[in-house]
Amino acid sequence: MRQDIFELAGKLGRNEPFDPEDMNSWLLIGADNRVSVFSGKVEIGQGGRTALAQIVAEEMESPFDSIDVYMGITGLVPFDRGTHGSWTIRMMRPALQKAAASVRETLLLMAAERWNLPPEQLQARDGAISVRGDPTRKIAYGELSQGKPLPKKLTGPPATKPVEQYRLIGRNVPRVDLPAKVTGKALYAADMKLPGMLHGKMLRPPSLGAKPGQADFSAARRQPGVIAAIQDGDYIGVVAETEEQAEAALEHIKVSYKEPEYNISTEQIWDYLKANSGEGLVIKESGSPQHGFHLAEKILKATYKAAYLCHAVIEREAAIADVTGDGAKIWITTSVPFGVRSDVALVLCMPEAKVQVAPTEIGGGFGRKNVGDAAIDAARLSRAAGRPVQVVWSREEDFTWGPYRSAAFVEVQGGIAKNGALTAWEYHVYSGPHVGGARARYGMPPDVKRERAEGHGPRADSGISRAVLPLYNIPNQITVAHASPSPLRTTSLRSLGAPMNCFAQECLIDELAEAAGMDPVQFRLSNLTDKDTGLRGVIEAATRKACWKPGKGPTGQGRGFACSLDSDSWIAEVVEVEVDRATGKVRVKRVVAAQDSGLVINPDGVHSQMESGIVMGCSATLNEGIQFKNGHILNASYLDYPIFTMMDAPTIELVIVPNPHMPAQGAGEPAFVPIPAAIANAIYDAVGARVRELPITPAKVLAAMPHHPS
Amino acid sequence: MPRTIHLTVNGHKHELAVEDNLTLASLLRHHLGLTGTKTGCEEGHCGSCTVLVNGSPLYSCLLLATAVDGQAITTIEGLAVDGKLHPLQQAFLDEEALQCGYCSPGIILNAKALLDKNPHPTEDEIRYSLSGNLCRCGLYQRIVRAVTNAAHSMAAKGAR
């Protein structure tokens, strides 16, 4: 049981704050020679736990199975902003590599002192320091450390191991978290049970943004099993002995709501985003766009749209809180334990030091777990009940009250010269926020300072402008990101605004290629410079693997291409589709992807993440979009928001372009990014229908088909 | 009024007093502590709560406990025998056919029912049989491969 997890910091003698420059903040060698790794990242299914252990074992010269990785437990691990943005490896590898190398070098110096030998005569091997040429003379790391933090002995940065000598990094070390998941032993937040634990349920307003008056709990409090019923601002909840009792008691709460005026629904969101955004933030301007369009032989202009997307992770929002006079303990499915800590502290008016948060096993995230809603629910209810409270949202609540990826809208025009060279580009994206703000919209008091730091509010955050710049050599260009408030609650969803930007860019590039009379892949390659080796590498790898050749015109079968730069990884994808001309139904048959993520820690882990991103991208492109009207979410179930099933999923073929001397880059999101554009381009190739709005439903395909009556 | 029912769960006999509205999923998770059975939606759409009832894969969130009185239930906790993983569990590990693992118990049980009935399914048969189990991590291709490999290893060993 993980309820004693908060005792670990005391047992291991660890105290905040942890200086990230100090190796002891990240690593501790027990007297038993086991190595504890402390990271603020969490295992969310991405394989982080295994990859971080590989990094440490490699650099420290410790056996892989001697490594224990502690993740995301506040008070025990260094602060971390969260497990998102494909940052687990990108951020942790430099930190852990340096800490592990420092530890190794320090242990070497300690052994040298003990034996009175020059350090050059010693070596670190297999969890011990030994004398070169005399393997019988050795001392285990744990014997040197005695389970204590290591003294500072290094005067400069440690030497790191050359890539050529890696024996663990680059290997498919089996995932350490999987055995417990296939036997049912892994404990997710809804699976945990504390002694005396109660169950909480929230009364949801009749529509989004509706404000409750004063609630009358007199009848609800008399219901069987009810321990407490509370109102805290807009928040109304009930605690009972069982989940069923809490649910049943909700119906006995008397309260009236003031519903806001709604004049926006799914169809008007594009106009809303444009009307409500400021003049925008110029992300890049070079040359003279006006002059560039003047020089162009042909100019194409188009608008692209994308609906709100829901994460729809199978695990529902869930947490347990145990709030006492001493403080609050939280167990939650989250990717932001430190964010949850400050949220709970804020809600309970408690110093952060009194709040402890531990992530449980996490049933998928993709950004959904970047908020800690259930912790806020459970903390409020536990404070009222004086006992531990578990909160598990219903599926409908998860679809309705969780945050989404913002809808977005793009206006773009591009110009080409007679020879097919891009001469000019003008790009405007309009979108609600991706980063920050979501917490404030879950009945939280505003934390202005943090919201500002996270980029909440009407400014172009890093999510809107992600992958926003054209990949090609265009002498005259301007790119502007326009941030709008969002009528629906938003947060980041796997790769944020990147797929939308790639969709608009890479579809227009295909259209420009056709206008130039060129094959779309040739057109792209011809608009790269000699310096674009990363992009060229993945384009060539993907098209070679897919045996790309120019299409023969509409046959019902189509191929599409798109590429991007996301999370510092290059990604290129070829998609094959089959389109039913009578119904407009699209089937993705095959996806071939090539990715360059620099150094790869665990190749199978990267493959797994690529497959995952591709399937999610296909599902988002063809099936997914939140529909809303008059403050109601209309498709709050898997039946009405049909994510891809095993029947829909394509055959996937992958190439990792080797680049071991580049730092390890992000791999969780890039493969999602080109999918919408590649599918749209493939549909055009198949039936001549250019659909510029996501999701690409059969009706939109039919309407866009040439000679269609509409 | 609670009713008394008799169930065999993973080979163990239970006599239980249950309310009429208690689902099999809740019974397993909250009364028997078998939390390997997940409930992703509680409305019969995601398949994560799949268990075997007399060998047939059913959504335990849609079944009332009283409706399975006298039946034999297999959950994910009942698949490994004496600590030795079922070939399907082993194949899911070997292929790393999971990421977050939330859908895996339901998928593995559904696949077991398929292989018990059809020891050598084609890829299309696997995809069709498992299409009622959603995997948001999207590792469908690996799951197909894992089930295929498990079928081969079960055939080789004559195991079920």
Image (spheres, rainbow, N blue to C red):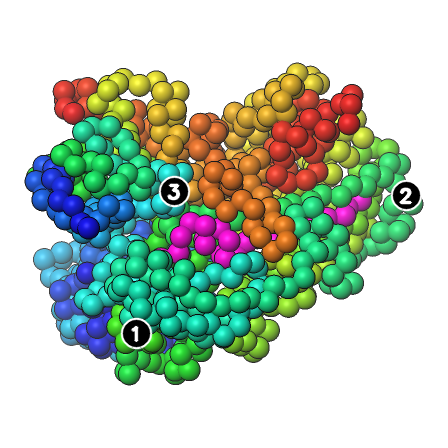
Q: Is residue A401 visible?
A: yes
Answer few, some or many: residues within 10 Å of disc 1's Cα (few below 14, many 20 plus, some between 14 and 19). Answer: many
Q: Image point 11% across, 61% down: which residue?
A: A137
* Disc nearest the viewer among 2 and 3: 3
Task: Have a look at marks 2 and 3 and say if they share a chain.
Answer: no
Query: Front-most of A525 and A610?
Result: A610
Q: Label for residue A102?
A: none
Label 2's element? helix
> Marks 2 and 1, Cα distance to the nearest angstrom?
72 Å
Q: Amino acid at mark 2?
A: Leu
- Asked if A652 appears above or below A386 in the picture, the reply is above
Q: Give the labeled residue for mark 1.
A: A385
Q: Give the labeled residue for mark 3.
A: B43
Q: Amino acid at mark 1?
A: Ala
Of all chains, the one bearing label 2 is A
* Disc nearest the viewer among 2 and 1: 1
Q: Which residues are magenta?
A: A390-413
